[in-house]
Image (cartoon, rainbow, N blue to C red):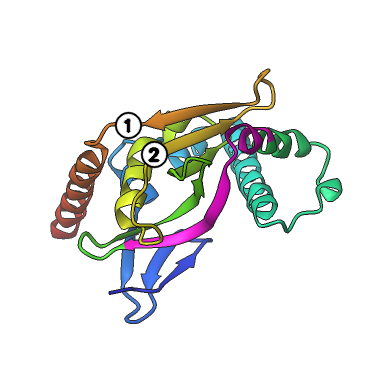
Amino acid sequence: MAFPLAFDASKHVYTRIADGCEVDGVTRILRSVGVSADFDRIANSSGRRADQIAAARGLGTTVHALTHAYDADDLVVESVREDYRPWLDAWVTFRTYYQLTPIAREVLVYHAQHHYAGTLDGLFVNPNDRVILLDIKTGDPESAGTRYQLAAYEAAQTLVPKVHERWAVQLDPALTVPYRVHPYTDANDFKYFLCFLTTYRHQLARRDAA
């Protein structure tokens, strides 16, 4: 059964449209149990760090928007600001090298059995008809627990019958090859995510009982 979702980006909150029920988000789960960095807490430690994190988040949001528009053939490349153009060029170089064709971008997913949601960056297919689930990063994928994030999205997505590979694509225009591909092949990643989900909910239950 499909459960259409609504997403409030300002609060990063997912709800089921049919009943208004709030749904746990994958990134919130990973952050709450310490698998991914809590950048809000880090930002609160000093004004300088707050500015750095705000700038990094702004860059990430813009790069995601630019790559999404490019993949949708809805981008006038000449209109992209000069300081963002190297990041777009890095994505174009990556896609060209791997000859990837987008199947879907920025898709809300929901796992009905485990009751969690998220937004996957993209599903792509290569010339060998292998489906690749991608997450685009402008920073270190390990700091976001991306392997578990992608495993959760893979289990929740219903767009394709099978995902063959999970990759984080770290864009970095400063490198000679302006990207790094981080493939995740551990079949246990989703089991680990379910452990994190159980821990997260146990933490919530303890707080509610306190």
| Crowd tier of the residue under label 2, counting other residues whose Cα lies within 10 Å: few below 14, some 14–19, many 20 or above | some
How far, Cα to Cα, is label 1 from label 2? 7 Å
Q: Secondary structure at mark 2?
A: strand
User: In the image, residue 81 lies at what x, y percent?
Assistant: 82, 44
Q: What residue is rendered at 69% in x and 38% in y? A: 92
Q: Nearer the viewer, residue 151 or 126?
A: 126
Q: Are marks 1 and 2 in contact (CB under 8 Å)?
A: yes
Q: Which residue is mark 1?
A: 185
Residue 3: which quarter of the image? bottom left
Which quadrant: the N terminus?
bottom left
Which quadrant: the C terminus?
bottom left
| 131 drawn magenta | no
Which comes sooner in the sequence, label 1 or label 2?
2
User: In the image, residue 178 lies at what x, y percent?
Assistant: 65, 25
- Furthest residue in direction top, as rendered: 176
Q: What residue is rendered at 50% in x and 28% in y? A: 181
Q: Nearer the viewer, residue 94 or 51?
A: 94
Q: What residue is rendered at 62% in x and 31% in y? A: 97
Residue type, numbered disc 1: Thr
Q: What residue is rendered at 65% in x and 41% in y? A: 59
Q: Secondary structure at mark 1?
A: loop
Residue 146: which quarter of the image? top left
Number of marks in picture: 2
Q: Does residue 99 appear to the left or right of 201 in the view shown?
A: right
User: In the image, residue 149 lies at what x, y percent?
Assistant: 36, 44
- Furthest residue in direction right, as rendered: 78
- Furthest residue in direction front, as rendered: 128
Residue type, numbered disc 2: Glu
Magenta residues span: 93-110
Instruction: Give the numbered dot on residue 66.
Output: none
User: In the image, residue 168 lies at what x, y percent?
Assistant: 47, 35
